[in-house]
Image (cartoon, rainbow, N blue to C red):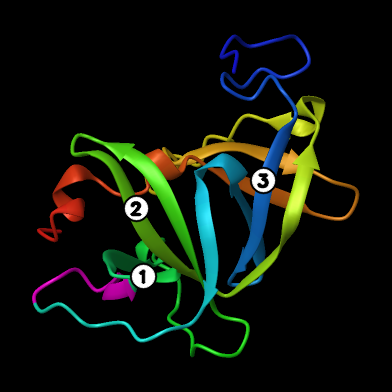
Amino acid sequence: MTTEASPNCPTPGLVQDHKLLQFELAGEFYGVDILKVREINGLMDITAVPQTPVFMKGLINLRGKVVPVIDLRLKFGLEESEYDARTSIIVIEFKSIHGQVQMGIVVDAVSEVISIPAAQVEPAPNFGARLKSEYIRGMAKTKDKVIIILDIDLILTDEELTFGG
């Protein structure tokens, strides 16, 4: 993928049309590059790990592989919510200093896979110093909503990946 900015899309890394997995979190819509998604699961048993950050829900056994799981609501500092039938775990794969890592992220609901033309994506606005926005790649505008496009590689720090939080 080209990472040069174009006149139609000033956000580096977002110059091509994108396929995103759209999901909901606290009534807002988010998107993550579909190429980062390994699978989508309903809620399953999560084994808690002591002395981890509050957003680190624990570990799941995914066909014999242990995968850490975070609650994205809590990671973003949003109000905790009861899990229900729509709650999903999206298993993503991303880069860290430890190499490629798989992580489950708990979201309120998975919506759909969507294609967003590059011309409909704007850079993340400057929220000021109080709100972290380094993991927002851009904002996609559709006719009826705004979708926050996440840079999943930046969601967790390397310290958090080692459960040191």
Tell whether 140 sits left or right of 57: right
Residue at label 2?
Answer: 102
Q: Is residue 162 left or right of residue 139?
A: left
Magenta highlight range = 51-61
Q: Is residue 46 magenta?
A: no
Q: What's under tag 2, amino acid-wise?
A: Gln
Secondary structure of the residue carrying numbered label 1: strand
Tell which residue pokes out farthest to the front in this image. 64
75 or 84, which lies in front?
84
Disc on the earlier residue, 2 or 1:
1
Q: Which mark is residue 117?
A: none
Give me the residue at 77% from left, 48% from top: 114
Please name the amino acid that badge 3 sits on: Leu
The nearer-to-camera label among 1 and 3 is 1
Cα separation between marks 2 and 1 = 11 Å
Position of 17 compared to 87: left or right? right
Q: Earlier in the sequence, mark 1 or mark 3?
A: 3
Q: Give the camera-side residue of 89 and 30.
A: 89
Quadrant of the drawing holding the C terminus: bottom left
Would residue 35 be seen by someone viewing this image from the given angle? yes
Which residue bears the numbered disc 1? Answer: 62
Which of the two residues, 41 or 159, is positioned nearer the viewer here? 41
Q: Considering the numbered disc 2 on the image, is that residue within a helix, a strand or a loop?
A: strand
